[in-house]
Every structure is written in structure tokens, then in C-alpha cells.
Amino acid sequence: MPHSSGGGSSHGSHGGSSHHSSSGRGGSSFRESSSYFPGSRRYSYFYRGRTHYYYSNKSPNDSKFRFLLILFYIPFFFGISVMTKQIFGKYAKIKVDYNDTIVVEDNIEVVKDEAGLYRSFADFQSKTGITPALVTIKYEDYALNYNSLEDYAYSEYLIRFNDEKHWLFVYEEVGDPDKISIPVDSVHYPDPAEPAWAFEGMQGNDTDPILTTEVTDKFNAILRKKLLEGESPDKAFSYAFDQITPTLMKFKWSPEMIAPLFMFGFVVLHMILMCGLTPKQLAKRKAVLAPGGEGEDSLKTDEYGYIKAANDSFSSGYGDNSSPYSSGYGDNSSPYSSGYGDNPYYTDNYGYTESKTDPEPEKIDFPQKGSKGEL
């Protein structure tokens, strides 16, 4: 809804009473590990030029529920977008998708240079996308039905425009006080020889990023100063618009920009970590069941993913590891065998090899032949 952008009169200035009002991880059953645990299966995936292995009790395809966590972050992004629009929106032109016809309705014949006023309005509209409008009226023509000029300006905005992209001004003058039967409560006469006047601005909500309090206060001060100097309303409005238009839409760093940028970075980083959107996690989603990944209850893997016997810190896992000292490359029926077959060497507990000597053949005594002459 539209709201006041402030105003002024021959006896003082005021601000709008309602300016810039606000418009209104996975479950505990999921587990991953670099080593085997009961109920897990072995998976492999390719990342940064090498194959990685891990154990999990769920398939990578079953972990897609993490993407649903993104819905949790939608309210945060919405709040950040509102803050960003208010802070950075002052540097973006409003989209002209509405009836942008400039309105100048002079009911009390105080506008002398209408062409100059239109030109100033058009320049402002071209740069910001906001359409200005001006309506002039006598105080006594509305005072019976409205409590204040602000109420009248609000009503006029709703009647004339069905969007939130206009900046409407209502300018009033009071007639001869001797001929007015209506109590003049909003305007008094500092000098009976000078006419009493007042103006009120009413802006749509979509103009808030550009028409900030700083901008509208500056505009009102310039306009009121020119009117107090005796300038005609059309000249005063033209001058005020010509003064503020060049200052708009220019980017300038300010400390207020830090908050939305910090919040945005924090929320994005938190979402990436919680939803598993890091490069490694995305690569892991393409993991496949590794060979032998079914039923590896008795197996463990080293840091390179090779399988080794669960109770053997010396075996490499490439063969039958029935011997605690075997290398696993062949038949290890002998507790000292290297696993390559018939080996003339054996190893001790420290891995040193020694020559294996063959046993001496059994000595057989044969009966001696008797000497000649003996039986």
C-alpha cells in the first residue's frame, strides 16, 4: 500500500507517519565409515584422479533426501532478498510494466510553466522508472471529508493508481480565512498577507528502494525552501526534481551492505555443507558397489582401499591368508612359507631371510664282504 513520503507547509515541515513501513542432516540410521562395520557395504568412487573407497549402510542413491533440506533455507534466502532489495535496489531502475502516464492536475490554477514541469517529471521517470504526479486543490474543497492532507493524498493515490510505482504530490492552498467556515487545523497564517500552502507526498511501496528516507527528506527540504522564497509551485517542483534526479541510481559503498552479504555467504556455506553439495560429496553420489562389496564382514581395507585380513596386520590380502606370516601370494600351508611355492629360504618374525639347509641323508650300513679265505 502507498505511504507518505513527508511534506511541508508555510508554517513548518513534517515527515510521513508511516514512511517505509514493512510489508509485511540425515537420520541417525545413516552411517558412513572408511572401515567395515556391521551391515555396511563397500563402495568406490572417482575423485581428483584416484579411486576412493568407503563403507556405508545405505546406497548413494538413497541419500538424495538431503536435497530436500534446501527447502529449509528458502525463508532465509527470502529474508536476505528483501534486505538486498532495500539496500541495493536504489541502484536499479524500476520495471515499467504499468500505466506510466504523467499526471498534472491543476485545480487551482497555480501551475504556470506546465511544459517545464513535465520535462522535469519525464527526466526523473526516465532514470528511475517511477512516475511522478501532481494534484493541486483548495483546503476547503476536501477538509469536510478528510482529517488531514495526508489522508486525502492517500485516498487520491488509491483512486487514481492501481500500482505501487507512482510518486503522487498534493499541493494545497487556503483561501481567504474570513470566508472559510471550516476550522483550519493543519494550516495557519504566519502572515495574513501571504497565502498559506502545504504539500504532501505519497509513494508506492515499490519505490521504497529508490525513494529512501534520505532522498525524500532532501527533496522536501529543497521544495519547501523554494516555496518559502516565493517560487511558484510548478517552478519549485521542477527545481527540486532537477536537483535530486542526477544524484539517484549511483552506486556507493556503505556499511549497511555488509550485513546481507555476510548473511548470504553464511547461509550458502551452511547449505552446501549440510546438503552434501561439496565437490567430494557430489562425486560420492556417483559411487558404485565395489567388487566384493557384498558380505565383507571379515575384511578391512587399508588407506588405499586394498582388502586385508581382519586379524592380520602383516597380510596384504591378495591370497589365502591362512598363515599369520604369509604374504598371501600362494599356498601358505607352511607357517614360514613366503607363498610363492617351494622356497629355499624362510623368514623370521622380523622379516629377515635365512638359507634353508637340506637334512643329511640317513646313513645305511651295509654288511661288509669277508676277506679272501673267510667264509
Image: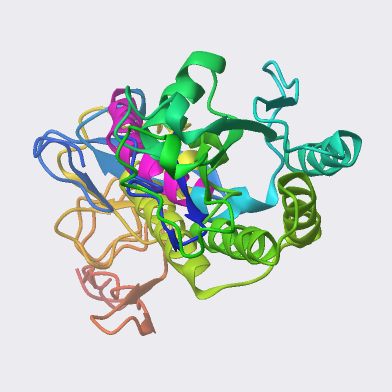
At which x and y percent is residue 342?
41, 57
Between 157 and 259, which is closer to the camera in this rendering? 157
Whether residue 233 can be seen here: yes
Q: Is residue 325 above or below residue 146?
A: below
Q: Where on the picture, by quarter, is residue 14?
A: bottom left
What residue do we see at 68% from left, 35% from top?
Answer: 132
Q: Nearer the viewer, residue 293 or 330?
A: 293
Q: Residue 145: within the magenta? A: no
Instruction: Please give the name of the residue rendered at 31% of the width and 46% of the height, measured from the top-left corner.
Output: 185
Lateral position of residue 280 relative to residue 249, left or right? left
Magenta-colored segment: predominant secondary structure: helix
Q: From this viewpoint, is residue 3 visible?
A: no
Indicate the colouring scheme. Answer: rainbow
Quadrant in which the N terminus is drawn = top left
Say which of 70 and 108 sits in front: 108
Q: Residue 238 in the image: x percent, y percent?
A: 79, 49
Q: Where's residue 316, x and y in %? A: 35, 58
- How many numbered marks does the figure carry? 0
Q: Residue furthest front?
A: 178
**Which portion, as a residue range, is magenta?**
62-85
Is 30 rendered above or below residue 61?
below
User: Residue 38, percent across and down?
Assistant: 9, 39
Q: Is residue 325 left or right of residue 38?
A: right
> In the displayed structure, would residue 246 be above or below residue 53?
below
Compared with 64, 173 (above or below) is below
Locate the C terminus and report the quarter of the image it occupies. bottom left
Rendered image quadrant of residue 95? top right
User: At x 71% / y 61%, what residue is drawn?
Assistant: 230
Q: Residue at x 41, y 29 (%)?
A: 152
Residue 81: within the magenta? yes
